[in-house]
Amino acid sequence: MTMRPILIAVLVALLLSGCTLTFPQVNAAMQLVSLPSDGQKEQGAPIWLASIGGVGAVLTPYAMDDYTLFANEDGDAIAFDGWTVRAIYGFGLTEPIKVSGRTGSRSVLSSLGRTKTMCSEWIDQPDESSLRWQQTCSVGPNEIAVNSDGNIEEIRMSLGRELGSVTLRVRY
């Protein structure tokens, strides 16, 4: 008896049983942060609208050590260090996206492999009612918009041709 029919039967059984992928990093981060229910949220608390490669989600920001974690109860999460999106989980991705480096050489690791890019220094571009920090990378532009109160209102970061970009916008 060959192993091939047995292997195929096991694979079919696994596929039909509905396998779920989990990411320990997100689970650990979600356990550190108790996500408030709708009844516990403060009135007027900001929410963030996120988009990665055309897939959107509504996220809530949580301060964690040196990062801001934007997350929801569906398992979508984005880690941001103040200048660079460091990790993206959920959003229909088969694997998380991880980013290392800030200025100069940057690396984006995803299910598609590793993409290296070169990024310039951040440059501030004053606007009428806000300040826009802009960075040029070989995979595309990055931008952080800061309002007159000094709060970040929008984050856009290019991830590469295949992955597109990640955008976060605050909504009050």
Image (tube, rainbow, N blue to C red):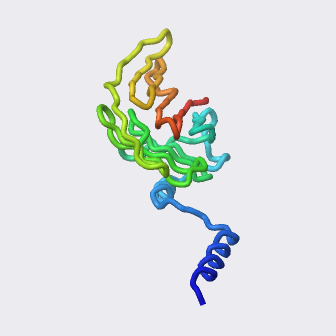
Q: Residue at x 49, y 46 (%)?
A: 88
Residue 17 point in image, percent of width and height: 68, 72
Residue 124 point in image, percent of width and height: 37, 18
Q: Is residue 74 above or below residue 167?
A: below
Q: Residue at x 42, y 12 (%)?
A: 126
- Relative to 121, is 89 on the left or the right? right
Image quadrant holding the N terminus, namely: bottom right
Q: How many marks?
A: 0
Which residue sits furthest top?
128
Closer-to-camera residue (85/61): 85
Q: Is residue 33 above or below residue 21?
A: above
Q: Is residue 171 above or below residue 33?
A: above
Closer-to-camera residue (151/7): 7
Q: Is residue 167 above or below residue 29?
A: above
Q: Residue at x 30, y 36 (%)?
A: 105
Closer-to-camera residue (148/43): 148
Residue 155 point in image, percent of width and height: 49, 30
Which residue sits furthest front?
2
Residue 7 point in image, percent of width and height: 59, 79
Image quarter for residue 54? Answer: top right
Which residue sits furthest right?
16
Q: Residue at x 43, y 23 (%)?
A: 150
